[in-house]
Image (cartoon, rainbow, N blue to C red):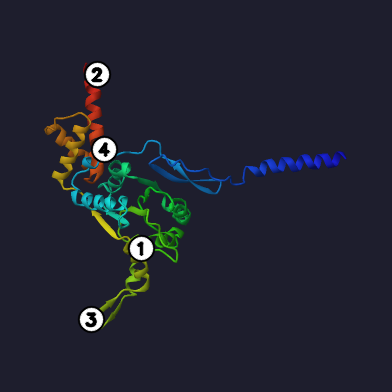
């Protein structure tokens, strides 16, 4: 009888330890939020509220007026229940691709727009996410930042299905907005160019190249972003300095802004923003010490 009691105790102890590994059922998402991040816990994916989303204003984004006009128009169609396209934003780093998507929340959250941020390694969960959002009244942008794939990534096919549909229709309250530093989202290799066929005057790309370009083709809208020239960079730097309370953009500030861009090796909105934060902060600190 003593041995039996010990066996029961050991079994109960084992069950307690196993419970830590058993996935718990995900709780109902907090639908009062306007932005979420897709996360995992014990094998379950769930919507984690972003309590303080970065609410950028569209007016704070400069030198990308054409891109702003296009993505705002597409998003306005979407939130009003009209047809709209998935969007791929490509180009140089720091030129406003991610910021312009975040700014849409400031512009359209009162109209029911919501943003769900997802990492590219979690794109295999897109069918689960679509099922979760399909019957909601809100309009959802599934946002994937810095999107690219390596050969064999499972998320590649999952994204293709959501963009282009399968036997099941895609949900009309979900769009995918993605940013990437390159338009072709899979790496291309020199050997693949050898697959190209020349038939008379016609050029036919090989199957591998066709497969790699097919994903970007499934985004109905492409928006390209470019590095700033010097004048554009300085104008954005001056605007951010005004935003941080430094209204005078004199020769000293101009020289400092150019030196900052030289040390970073590029001119972009991100570089101008980072310069302004540093320069304005240094000015404020110097004023405090001299007071």
Disc number for residue 201: 3
Q: Looking at the image, which residue is at 28% across and 58% down?
A: 221
- For this orientation, the residue located farthest to the bottom is 200
Instruction: Give the camera-side residue of 271 and 113.
Output: 113
Is residue 226 visible in the rendered image? The answer is: no
Say left or right for 71 vs 160.
left
Categorize mark 2 by other alpha carbons within 10 Å: few (<14), some (14-19), many (20+): few
Which residue was labeled with disc 4? 274
Question: At numbered mark 2, what does the secondary structure look like: helix, strand or loop?
Answer: helix
Which residue was labeled with disc 1? 215
Question: At numbered mark 1, what does the secondary structure look like: helix, strand or loop?
Answer: helix
Q: Nearer the viewer, mark 1 or mark 4?
A: 1
Say left or right for 177 vs 242.
right
Instruction: Give the camera-side residue of 218 and 10.
Output: 218
- Spatial separation of the CA atoms under disc 1 and disc 4: 33 Å
Q: Nearer the viewer, mark 2 or mark 3?
A: 3
- Spatial separation of the CA atoms under disc 4 and disc 3: 51 Å
- Spatial separation of the CA atoms under disc 4 and disc 2: 23 Å
Q: Looking at the image, which residue is at 45% across and 42% down?
A: 48
Categorize mark 1 by other alpha carbons within 10 Å: few (<14), some (14-19), many (20+): many
């Amino acid at each position: 009888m003593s041995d039996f009691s010990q066996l029961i105790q050991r079994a109960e102890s084992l069950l307690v330890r196993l419970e830590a590994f058993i996935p718990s059922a995900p709780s109902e998402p907090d639908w009062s939020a306007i932005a979420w991040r897709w996360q995992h816990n014990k094998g379950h994916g769930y919507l984690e509220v972003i309590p303080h989303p970065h609410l950028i204003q569209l007016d704070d984004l400069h030198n990308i007026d054409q891109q702003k006009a296009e993505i705002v128009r597409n998003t306005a169609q979407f939130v009003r229940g009209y047809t709209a396209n998935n969007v791929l934003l490509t180009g140089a780093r720091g030129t406003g691709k991610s910021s312009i998507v975040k700014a849409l929340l400031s512009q359209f959250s009162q109209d029911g727009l919501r943003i769900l941020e997802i990492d590219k390694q979690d794109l295999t969960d897109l069918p689960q996410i679509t099922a979760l959002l399909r019957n909601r009244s809100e309009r959802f942008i599934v946002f994937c930042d810095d999107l690219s794939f390596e050969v064999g990534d499972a998320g590649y096919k999952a994204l293709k299905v959501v963009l282009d549909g399968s036997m099941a229709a895609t949900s009309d309250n979900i769009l995918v907005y993605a940013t990437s530093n390159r338009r072709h989202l899979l790496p291309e290799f020199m050997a693949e160019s050898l697959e190209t066929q020349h038939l008379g005057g016609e050029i036919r790309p090989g199957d591998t190249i066709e497969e790699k370009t097919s994903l970007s083709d499934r985004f109905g809208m492409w928006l390209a972003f470019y590095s700033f020239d010097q004048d554009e960079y300085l104008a954005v730097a001056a605007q951010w300095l005004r935003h941080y309370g430094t209204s005078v953009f004199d020769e000293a500030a101009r020289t400092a802004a150019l030196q900052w861009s030289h040390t970073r090796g590029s001119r972009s909105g991100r570089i101008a923003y980072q310069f302004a934060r540093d320069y304005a902060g240094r000015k404020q600190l110097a004023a405090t010490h001299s007071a």
